[in-house]
Image (tube, rainbow, N blue to C red):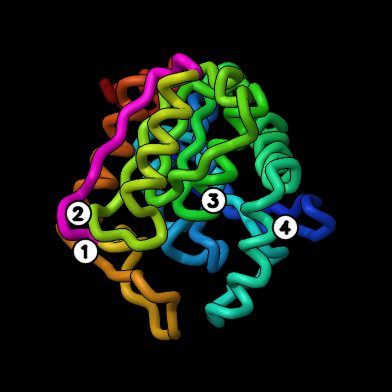
Amino acid sequence: MTTMTTRTVEYPADGLTMTGHLALPAGTGRGPAVLIGPEGMGLSDVERRRADALAELGYVALAFDLHGARYLGDPEEMLARCLPLLADPDRMRDIGRSALDVLHAEPRTDPDRIAAVGYGTGGAVALELGRDGADLRAIGTVNALTTGRPGEAANIRCPVWAGVGSEDPIMPPAQREAFTAEMQAAGVDWRLTVYGGALHAFHHPPVDHPTVRGVGHHPRHAQRAWRDVLDLLAECLPVTEAPDGGPAVRT
């Protein structure tokens, strides 16, 4: 009986050499796949563990890179890179499409069954993939209520779930309203979950470096948000048992 395996993958995007974390489920057959986008700080063990957890459930999972194998623990450095990135949909799409190409090239991936889940800046990348018309089965984001260029949300071809903390000063009520208005006007199958009392990046475990104001971990809602992500995947991208004795059914 084989077990979940992982490996590091390098690929070009945004003028950088990105280093992602690929987790493969047990077995040898093809199955559904999930892109996982990190917070603005960049790829860390938090996203790697999430990829591993999804692989244990039967998904091919790629936690993608934002900054060329760098983790930006200095808030000023992080904002200096992320704010221009968030203002440039084409750059975000390049990052997302390049990671999507890695998943498509993986023999274990069913290319017709891919979802994107992202947090913060990584969630904005996932949404831009949708606005760019990427063939995705679902998009899930946490604290990434970004709006796109006018009319492009109509290109989203899958359900969208978004989660946000009620006390998030970076994604305030006005941002929520703009996001939901965009999704509704485009006819997207969308849902928004507001976690009462939670701040920005409430899903992320505490870090040992400074953060931007308004960030705070909320353990209970972090667990709930993860369950909500799993529910989205179970609904839109269920894992079925592979003929070669791969992962068990998840419905």
Count of residue discs: 4
Which residue corresponds to the image point at 68% horizontal and 30% vertical from the top-left? Answer: 104
The answer to if 195 sits in the magenta stretch is: yes
Secondary-structure class at tag 3: helix
Circle 4 or circle 1, nearest the eye: 1
- Mark-to-mark CA distance, 2 and 1: 6 Å
Mark 3 surroundings within 10 Å by alpha-carbon count, few (fewer than 14), some (14 through 19), many (20 or more)? many
The answer to if 2 sits in the magenta stretch is: no
Where 165 falls versus 104 (above or below)? Answer: below
- Mark-to-mark CA distance, 2 and 4: 31 Å
Mark 2 surroundings within 10 Å by alpha-carbon count, few (fewer than 14), some (14 through 19), many (20 or more)? some
Circle 2 or circle 4, nearest the eye: 2
| Residue designated by label 3 | 122
Q: Which residues are magenta?
A: 186-198
- Mark-to-mark CA distance, 4 and 1: 30 Å
Mark found first going from the N terminus, 4 or 3: 4
| Residue designated by label 4 | 18
Residue 221, label in figure: 2
Q: Name which residue type carries label 4.
A: Met
| Residue designated by label 1 | 218
Rendered image quadrant of residue 209: bottom left
Which residue corresponds to the image point at 58% horizontal and 80% vertical from the top-left? Answer: 76
Q: Give yes or no for contact between labels 2 and 1 (Cβ–Cβ under 8 Å).
A: yes
Q: Is residue 160 left or right of residue 193?
A: right
Residue 94 place in picture, x, y as percent: 75, 43
Q: Is residue 236 left or right of residue 62?
A: left
Nearest to the observer: residue 44 or residue 191? 191
Q: Name which residue type carries label 1.
A: His
